[in-house]
Amino acid sequence: MERPIDLELKKLKEQLLTMAGEVEQQLSLAVRSLVDRDSQAAEAVIAADERVDAREKEVDRTAVEIIVRERPLASDLRLVITATKIAPDLERVGDHAVNIAEQALVLNRMPPLKPFVTLPRMADIAKEMLRQALTSYVEHDARLARQVIARDDVVDALHEEVFRELLTYMLGDPQTIPRALALILISRSLERIADQATNIAEQVVYLVEGQDIRHVHGGEERGV
Amino acid sequence: MSENVRFSLQNLTCAYSGQVVVRDVSLDIPAAGVTAFIGPSGCGKSTILRCLNRMNDVVPGFSLSGRVLLDGEDLYGDSQDPVLIRRRVGMVFQRSNPFPTSIFNNVAYGLKLHFKLTRAQLELEVEQALRAAALWDEVKDRLQAPATSLSGGQQQRLCIARALAVKPEVMLFDEPASALDPVATGKVEELVMDLGRRMTVVIVTHNLAQASRVADRTAFFLRGELIEFNRTVALFTNPQRPETEAYLLGRLA
């Protein structure tokens, strides 16, 4: 049975997915600007950030409209609430993509410090986490969401690894400090993106199960 | 039984002329706060409400099994006096039903019936009841005017004042605002919430937004059965039963 609200909810989901697609593209482009030393790509990421910000507002507007017009309840209400929480997470991912692009611009003006190994891997995992978190939202799949949450630790560990390695560079040769710092900031952004994906996944668990698992420490309690 | 339960329904089954309309409902209504009964038409919510002060007694063909306890006492026990029960458990209906007399006499009626008061005491009690029903300021200068000269919303608050005058421990509301405009509805809802801070309040409503605004707890009924009873926010955001979910989503077939 199609209800008037179904159309509106579909629109909300579509807006969120469009935003997610754009954010993902921003992230891919930012990582490429770093790995391929492509400063044009970095500039494109920075220029496109406004569009992502506008998408966030668009999602909010639709959500408010649904709340006012349809007074959603039960799972409808949870869908709207989670959309308004996921959009800012995506917007933050967009900001991190910009941070990465900005650091890439700095790095591209200097000779490479070392070949990229861990950072692209981190980027791949973070991107996949983001994609899976969004898939779990669309498909109401709490199991997939919990898998995303479990992977956050992997990215955290990689970030620590990158940090320690770059520290040795800086200690060994002060000339590497600007480049090592830029790389640490990039690693930090990727680690934060994985956190945003985790936040989104936590919202999906709330959406599907009505259970708020945020700020519960330890994997067991979060059911991962 | 725990101390803070006001009503305890135990396997309550009701029928009109043999047709079962409430089936095996067991429910504890806490003494504090507002409890809402929701559900589609014919779900039995009003019938159950009317069992809480034996208002169904006068309906021909009505029969009941199971027990309704008020503070641990069986309301349908042999020694119970329905008139006394209705003093303890006041009721306000969907349509305001003021007596065809003055505003003052409407409120004074129950007081005269139940208590021996001097004129001064009576006037004081009437004023207090009208104040409690948030009507005093609007009628204090025309207490002798006919009740029917009041607006619909005022008439409904007059009925609330009339019920409050005899100092009930419980107030029952059966769709109290369904015939009122949004402003008058807001006043009645405010009153319901205010009363809920001081006494047990049970409200039947088909208006989900109203239940979510005024009630601390909500019970959902379907086809005479209790489906789910929970804190209102929990029930409206995360219902545990598929029937409740379907009803809240407007998907109930």
Image (cartoon, rainbow, N blue to C red):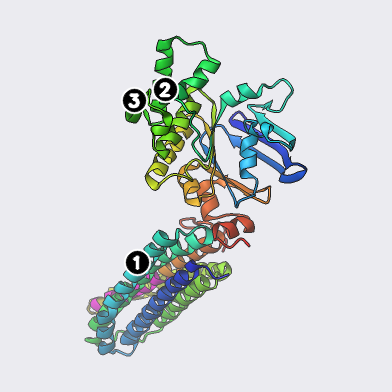
What residue sits right under mark 3 in the picture?
Answer: B142
For residue B148, above or below residue A171:
above
Quick check: can you spot residue B95? yes
Label 3 – label 1 distance at C-alpha: 49 Å
Q: CA distance from mark 1 to mark 2?
A: 51 Å
Question: In the rendered image, which residue does mark 2 sit on?
Answer: B104
Callouts 3 and 2 on one subunit = yes
> Where is mark 1, residue-wise?
A61
Q: Nearer the viewer, residue B11 or B205?
A: B205
Q: First in sequence: mark 3 or mark 2?
A: 2
Residue B71 vertical placement versus B30 (above, below): above
Say if mark 3 contacts mark 1, CB within 8 Å: no
- Name the magenta segment's main secondary structure: helix
Q: Amino acid at mark 3?
A: Arg
Towards the viewer: A223 or B142? B142
Q: Chain of mark 2?
A: B
> Quick check: can you spot residue A157?
no
Residue B50 lies, with reference to residue A91, above or below; the image says above
Magenta part of the chain: A178-194
Q: Nearer the viewer, mark 1 or mark 2?
A: 2
Q: Amino acid at mark 1?
A: Arg
